[in-house]
Amino acid sequence: MSDPRIVALGGGHGLYATLSAARRLTAYVTAVVTVADDGGSSGRLRAELDIVPPGDLRMALAALASDSPQGRLWATIIQHRFGGTGALAGHPIGNLLLAGLDEVLADPVAALDELGRVLGVRGRVLPMCPIGLKIEADVAGLESDPRMSRVIRGQVAVATTPGQVRRVRLLPGHPPATPQAVDAIMAADLVVLGPGSWFSSVIPHVLVPGLVSALQATTARRALVLNLADEPGETAGFSAERHVHVLAQHAPDITVDDIIVDEARVPGQRERDQLRRTAGLLQADVVFADVSRPGTPLHDPAKLASALQGVLARGEAVAPPAATAPLAADGIRRERGDDTWR
């Protein structure tokens, strides 16, 4: 497939890895980004200005910036953080630019598109929801009685809790999906979820009803990329199988076609067979591949790109006959090839 349309859902460094891989396959890459960050610069800006937290959105723009000298320069500029001890200390330039553009244009999507043009981004970066959200979690292991759980609120608190996260919710409940994100999923050839912080960057996407409906209705191949290891705090001690099980618990109506897992993550045949059985909760096949960067806990963009290309090829081999497109978020029925999808 030449120039496939790829949509990547996630946030933070995990999404950066997926975007770095996807852009090796096509120029038509759309990032759909979580909007619940409440720490650091993003937390300060959303508290002061009541805007969509810009940090993960900024990172996605940097990942998709043009390879031209101007694009790389601007990618470096937006990632640069102010030093010192004053009011600007710790703020990346890109966060402030997005905050300013949002105020001027009164639209976070327009702000992202405008900064994307400066960076030479050929794809698009979109918030999963047009408003900032909060994460709330039920966490066990914080009380003297192990049967009791405590409610923890905030992305940073959830990501760093010493307890065991059982379930997460978004506040406000049933948040709206960004219409352009729904359209991008409906028009895609491949939709990729993960890797990333499981409870705070990956699962939030399947808690937005509009995104869930789009993921159910799209004709795109759907892939889930598992993390290379558990993370201290929210997924400490989690096996690859546990990651899949928790996602299925939060999104019982979601199915995916392929689950990509690093072959070194699950080396034993017994464990692989068990993961394949658990993948049945999502009606998915498991793809074992070398996707890690040696000596680091990071995905290698070139290796992950190769795995995604294999998933696309599998989709071409089993492509269903063309069907009438379902309604998008704005109620418009769109067919593939319609320019309004782009």
Image (cartoon, grey):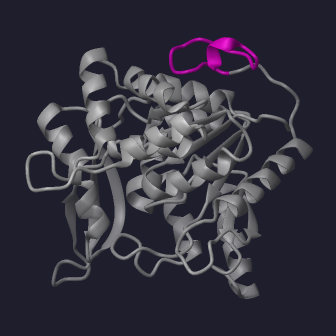
Task: Say above or below: 206 vs 341.
Answer: below
Identify the residue at horizontal 43%, vertical 22% (top origin): 114
Quadrant location, the C terminus? top right
Q: Is residue 56 left or right of residue 148?
A: right
Residues shaded magenta: 326-342
The image quarter in which residue 5 lies: top right
Q: Is residue 340 magenta?
A: yes
Q: Position of residue 178 (x, y in %)?
A: 44, 27
Q: Is residue 135 left or right of residue 43?
A: right
Task: In the displayed orientation, state which residue is furthest to the right.
Answer: 317
Q: Examine the residues drawn in magenta and state their main secondary structure.
A: loop
Q: Is residue 70 magenta?
A: no
Q: Is residue 49 left or right of residue 254?
A: left
Task: In the displayed orientation, state which residue is furthest to the left.
Answer: 86
Q: In front here: 245 or 221?
A: 221
> Would you say residue 53 is visible in this rendering?
no
Q: Position of residue 335 (x, y in %)?
A: 73, 16
Identify the residue at horizontal 46%, vertical 24% (top origin): 113
Identify the residue at horizontal 58%, vertical 48% (top origin): 19
